Amino acid sequence: MSFTPHGKHLIAGEWVGGGATFTSEPAHGPAHDFSIGTVDLVDRAAQAAEQAFWTYGYATRQERAAFLDAIADEIEARAEAITEIGSQETGLPPARLQGERGRTVGQLRLFASHIRAGDYLDRRHDAALPDRQPLPRPDIRLIERPIGPVAVFGASNFPLAFSTAGGDTAAALAAGCPVVVKGHSAHPGTGEIVAEAVHAAIAKQGIHPGVFSLIQGGRRDVGTALVQHPLIKAVGFTGSLAGGRALFDLCAARPEPIPFFGELGSVNPMFLLPHAVAARGAEIGKGWAGSLTMGAGQFCTNPGIAVVAKGAEGDAFVAAAQHALAQVGPQVMLTDGIAKAYRDGQARFEGRNSVEPLLSTESTGREASPNLYETDAATYLQDHALGEEVFGPLGLVIRVDGADDMQRLALGFEGQLTATIHLDEGDLPQAQRLLPVLERKAGRVLVNGFPTGVEVCDAMVHGGPYPASTNFGATSVGTMAIRRFLRPVSYQNFPQALLPADLQ
C-alpha cells in the first residue's frame, strides 16, 4: 500500500481542508503541505465528541473492545506505508518504527482484552443492612464510569506509540471516552495515515464518527482552545516540561478545572553501588553508553545521569563509558528544533565551571553526537540546572565520596520517571537504605538494567512525581492508564433493572 498525504484534518468522520497550510520537514523524502488547525475545528470536534459520548460511553465493553481490535487491524493493514512515511518524517530507522507499530497495536489489543475481563471497573457492593442499629444501611454499589471527551497531544519522539492512536488515545477509548487528537507537526503524515486507520475502524464497527477527530498542528492557539474547551474533560500529553506546564496551568485556570495527565520527561538517574562497580564497572559503563545513545537519546526514559563513587573502580566505569560513547557517530534527530535544543543543552554544560567535559563533540544541522560530563555531588546539589533534561545523547557522571554522600544526593533529586540501582549481593544493605528514597522520587525503580524502553503490561508505571509528570498517581503506559479517564459513581438503593449493565 502506497500513501501520499492529502493534508486534511479528520473531524467526526469528515476530511476537512482549506485555509492556511504548513509544509512538513522530513528527514528525507518529499515534503507535503498540511492544513493548519483552527479554533473553529476544535469546537466542531469537541461538539461531535460530546454527541458521540452518549452512545459510545454507554456501549458494552465487548463493543468497545471490538473497536480497539479493529483499529489495530487497520493499522496493521497499512504497516508498510506507515513505516515508509514515518521513517521519512522522523529519520527513525524502519526497524524502530516496525517495533513501535507492534507496540502500538499490541497495547490496543491488550486494552481490548483488559476491558473484556472487566476488572478495571473496580465493582464494589455493600449490601443493605435494614436491621442495623442505630441506623440501617442502604444498598450501595460502585462502578467506574467514563468521564467524557478527552484531548490527546501527539508526542514528537513516538509517532505511533504516544501519538494519534497511541497509549493516551487507546486508554481513553477503552474507558469509553471519545478523543480529539492534536497531531504533532513533526510527523503530520504519520498522524494522517493512522487517523485513516481509525476512520476505517469506525466505519467497520458502526461507531459514532465523533468518537475520534484529528486536528493537525501549526498553531499554538489550537492547543489552548482544546484544553480550555468546556466539553473536554481531561487531557493526555507527552512532551516538554515547559509546554506541558503551560497546558497544565490552562487546565487549572478553567472555570471547570480538569485533570491534565502530562508526562514531561526526566533525567532517570542510575546509582552504581560499590560491589557491582568492582565486579563489572566497565561492563556497566559500556551498557550505559548504548542506552544513552539509543535512538539518539530521544527517549523520556533516557538515563542521563550516572552516580558512582570516586576512586579507581569508579574511574574504570567512567573510562569504559567514555570510550564507548566516542565510537558512536552522529545520529539524525527527530526535528531541526529538537536538534537545536540539544545543542543549546550542550552549550549550557560547556559554559559551566561546575562540570568537567569528558567527551565534547560538535553537533551540526539535524544530527547529534554524544557528550559526557562529570561533576561531584556537592556541586550538583548547588546547581539545579544540571538536573534539567537535555533531550539527546548527553550524559552526566556524578562522583560521590561514599554511601552517605550518595544518600544525600538521592534525596536532592526531583521527581523522575525512573531510577536504577546497579548492585551485587554485597550491596544489598546499601540498596535497602537507598530504596525508600528512590521509590519516593520515581514511578519505576529498576535493578541491574537500563530504563530505556517501557514494557506495555498490567504492572507498568510510566509516570512519577513532578516534574516527571503532573499526576503522580497515574501512568500513561499499561492497563492502569485506562483509570485516568474514569471516575467512581455510587448507586444507592437502585432497583436491579435500573443499574448499569456491568452492575447487573
Image: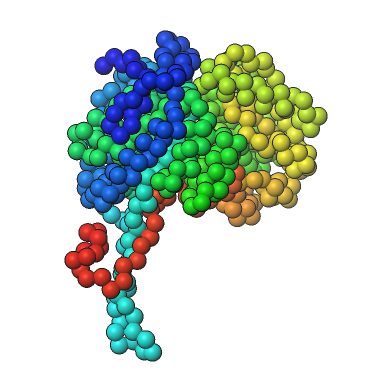
376 or 482: nearer the eye? Answer: 482
Q: Is residue 83 visible?
A: no
Locate residue 182 relative to residue 494 in the image: left or right.
Answer: right
Q: Check the image and name the residue furthest to the bottom.
A: 134
Locate residue 71 relative to residue 330 in the image: left or right.
Answer: left
481 or 359: nearer the eye? Answer: 481
Q: Position of residue 52 (x, y in %)?
A: 29, 43
How are the residues colored?
rainbow
Locate residue 458 relative to residue 57 in the image: left or right.
Answer: right
Answer with the quarter of the image where residue 499 lies: bottom left
Q: Position of residue 450 (x, y in %)?
A: 53, 36
How many numbered badges does the structure rendering display? 0
Q: Quadrant of the N terminus?
A: top left
415 or 159: nearer the eye? Answer: 159
Identity of the residue drawn at 64% across and 45% down: 414
Q: Quadrant of the C terminus?
A: bottom left
* Above or below 264: residue 292: above
Identity of the residue drawn at 68% across and 29% down: 318
Identity of the residue drawn at 46% across and 27% down: 217
Q: Is residue 36 visible?
A: yes
Q: Check the image and name the residue furthest to the right.
A: 353
Q: Position of residue 154 (x, y in %)?
A: 45, 32
Identity of the residue drawn at 34% across and 52% down: 146
